[in-house]
Structures are given as C-alpha cells and as structure tokens.
Amino acid sequence: MSRPAPPRCRSYGASRSRSPPVRPLPYREVARRLIAAGFVQRGQRGSHVKFTKQQDDGTLVAIVPRHREVEAGTLRSIIRQAGLTAREFDRL
C-alpha cells in the first residue's frame, strides 16, 4: 500500500517580508541611484563600470554593465553588492 502524500505547508513564504519586485532599469538610472547612495565611479573595463563606496569596515564594490537596460537579475545582484535592499534602492 502506498502512503498518502504529506499535507503541504500553506504558510510557506508567508512570514517572508515582501520586497518590491525588481524591474529592469536603464544604466543611467542605476548609476544615478548608486551615486545617490554614496558610490563613486572608479573606472571602466569594456562595457562594465566599477562603482565603489568607502566604509569603516572596508570598501563596497558594485560592477554595473553599461547596457541600454540592466536586466532584473543583474540589477538584484548589483543591489546586493551595494549592500542595499530593493526597497532602499527604489527610494533613491
């Protein structure tokens, strides 16, 4: 005899705080928001631009592709590199 499947947990994800969805943005808008957060453009290699921010415990570095539009997944990674949340990034 086969066992019945265990009941699914209906509260999965319910306790997670919802952050706003990350949508693709133009490079210029991403750069503007990083500069507003205290980052400085430090250089470029090919189509990628380096932004840095000095902090007491080290330096944050965010690499941004200089594309017409920065895709959502790439933007999430940039926000993480910058030490920001999606909500904080949206408010800049």
Image (cartoon, helix red, strand yellow):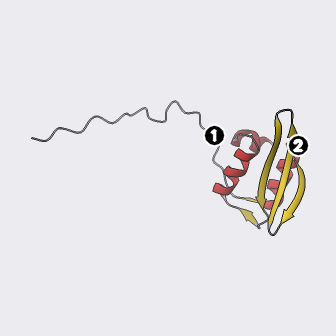
Q: Residue furthest front?
A: 58
Secondary structure, mark 1, is loop
Residue 57: quarter of image: top right
The mark closer to the camera, 1 or 2, is 2
Residue reaching furthest top?
15
Q: Residue furthest left?
A: 1
**Which residue lies at the image location 79% right of the left edge and 61% below the top edge?**
27
Quarter of the image holding residue 64?
Answer: bottom right
Which residue in the structure is indicated by mark 2? 38
- The image shows a total of numbered marks equal to 2
Label 1: how many residues lie within 10 Å, few (<14), some (14-19) or many (20+)?
few
Q: What's under tag 1, amino acid-wise?
A: Ser
Whether residue 2 sits left or right of residue 61 in the image: it is left
Percent coordinates x, y for residue 51 in the rendering: 84, 52
Kind of residue at badge 2:
Gly
Quadrant holding the C terminus? top right
> Which residue is painted at 88% across and 43% down in the image?
38
Residue at label 1? 19
Whole-percent x and y of residue 67?
76, 67
Cα distance, mark 1 to mark 2? 22 Å
Is residue 13 left or right of 78 when viewed as pictured? left
Q: Which residue is painted at 63% across and 40% down in the image?
A: 19
Secondary structure beneath dot 2 equals loop
